[in-house]
Amino acid sequence: MGSTTVSPHGSRGALRGRRRVERIVAAKGNGLCRHRSAPSPPTRGPSTGTTSVAASTTTSTTTSRCAALATGDFPKPEFEGIESFEEAAALSRYFSSLPRPEKPLKVAVIGGGLAGLSAAKYLTDAGHVPIVLEGRDVLGGKVAAFQDEDGDWYETGLHIFFGAYPNMMNLLKELDIEERLQWKCHSMIFAMGNQGRPGEFSRFDFPDIPAPWNGLVAILRNNDMLTWPEKIQFGLGLLPAIILGQKYVDEQDKYSVSEWMRKQNVPDRVNDEVFVAMSKALNFCNPDELSMTVVLTALNRFLQEKSGSKMAFLDGPPNTRLCQPIADRITDNGGQVHLNARLKSFNVDAADAAGATNAVPGSPLRSLTLADGSVLEADAYISTVPVDVLKILLPAAWKDMAYFRNLSQLEGIPVINIHLWFDRKLSTVDHLLFSRSPLLSVYADMSTTCRGYEDPDRSMLELVFAPAEQWIDKPDAAIVDATLQELERLFPGEILADGSKAKVLKYHIVRTPRSVYKAVKGTGDQRPTQKTPVANFFLAGCFTRQKYLASMEGALLSGKLAAQGVCEALQEGRIQARALEKTKKVDATTN
């Protein structure tokens, strides 16, 4: 069994164990067990799209055995007409409605994740020529996936698509791939194993009525996790956010979730029952650290939009089912996408023979040097590299500028994603599950939830290990052992940590030492805008300022805003189209 340790730069570190894996953020291990016979899979209903299982709820409340919760896919929600969706659609139309440029801009986009691909796609919609430079051999960035020698896929993270992702929903529509999302029943499901009720789950089921009433009914009908006095106190605590809106939400960045709960006299048990799990799902950290603005932003979206909290899974690996169609649109429209094109340095000005430059704060970017020594000149540059990497690569002439000094307060958070293949089909739920355990954030049986990973005979659990700071450097075996101990509480009749029941056939562990930015209290104002003080340099990525924070939607929106910034800079005369006349070859593999 092997593991790969990765520095914040994304370079390979030391390898331990018997087998090497040529992935920058991925580690793979094989179990020692053989396949055993599996129970028959649940049967699909004839026309409703649901899954029928011969089980019933254990009580008249919303708690039930996991076998009773199996469901199938549901129709796509209707987003047209919703304010946020139409706002995102208008931003998309902005690019296609611009006058075609007489001389297109050549724009270097550093990074082939969602932010970079989004920026490049919308630049081509505006008639410009983006050149995407991805340092690895796979697209996707934080949503990248890898395929092992058995043909099985494993992902950098467990990625969920919410109805409250309007830019994502617009993008899927623009690419004509909306059917690739598998929508699940409108529920939030929490495991009760660590609350002394192993194998049971508590649901918040959202009825098919307008928002915010569907969310309020879902909360009021669940009596397993919160008492009526606790619900009332929590509702009273939320009133300022509901009445005062986003201004109030932004101002709460000075409080952690736990501090805000105490300030609003919300009982500690509300925090323990709900917001420990929610904080780890939103930003992989505990409520003692997470900014309350993050939670209130999510709650606002969920309460304001009928399908805002509805969840979907992509029907296969994100880099092939989502990122590749974006890349294809970019190249079809005249842009370029290059893999294995790792950035070495930003070049602000040429050095003289003594190594000195005439660069001053705000000096424009002149070119990029890649790891292979090639140089790329462009009219504008969009960096989507993680904030930890950006701080290292910043030119000396920029580091003392107030805009860039603020980046010192931002850093990525460690994340571990675990994939376990079992020798049998487990009685799991066709949905995302909040584990509510000390070590695990959320998990799903991807062999049930995702068509591309479907297996009627064996389960593949994908789990997010969070918080991960204390575990990121530990051996694979220790992480797997700890995970199985947690799963024993969640599947007491099927999994034992000693392996005497369901056995692990193989596993993959994907470590990302610096993932999405850590949204701790007091850092909201430090997040940079996409426009920088450098006229031809722009930023994108979930750490930049946009209202969807550290999420796929936030990354996509940041890319669109960066592309918009480039287009506006051209209109205002701050940048000009010159570089296409003097293009230097990028020595990289073109996707």
Image (cartoon, rainbow, N blue to C red):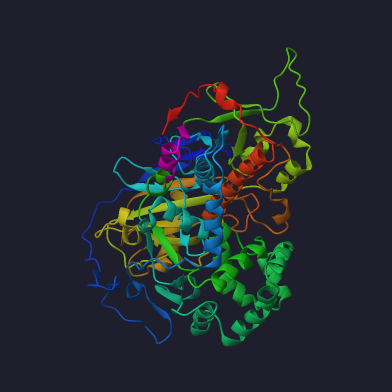
- In this view of the protein, can residue 510 be seen by the observer? yes
- In this view of the protein, can residue 370 be seen by the observer? no
Q: Quadrant of the N terminus?
A: top left
Give the percent coordinates (x, y) of residue 373.
Answer: 55, 21
Looking at the image, which residue is at 72% across and 69% down? 248
Q: Quadrant of the C terminus?
A: top left
Residue 80 is covered by the magenta coloring: no
Name the one closer to the observer, 23 or 128: 128
* Relative to 523, residue 113 above or below: above
Which residue is situated farthest in the top direction here? 353
Name the one closer to the observer, 472 or 142: 142
Give the percent coordinates (x, y) of residue 380.
Answer: 62, 34
- Residue 312 relative to residue 569: left or right: left
The quadrant where residue 17 appears = top left
- Residue 229 relative to residue 61: left or right: right
- Residue 525 relative to residue 210: left or right: right
* Relative to 169, residue 228 above or below: below
Looking at the image, which residue is at 31% across and 60% down? 502
Name the one closer to the observer, 378 or 373: 378
Residue 333 is covered by the magenta coloring: yes
Give the percent coordinates (x, y) of residue 438.
Answer: 53, 63
Give the percent coordinates (x, y) of residue 290.
Answer: 65, 61
- Residue 210 relative to residue 501: left or right: right
Q: Which residues are magenta?
A: 326-339
Looking at the image, which residue is at 40% across and 41% down? 328
* Relative to 103, residue 435 above or below: below
The quadrant where residue 39 appears = bottom left
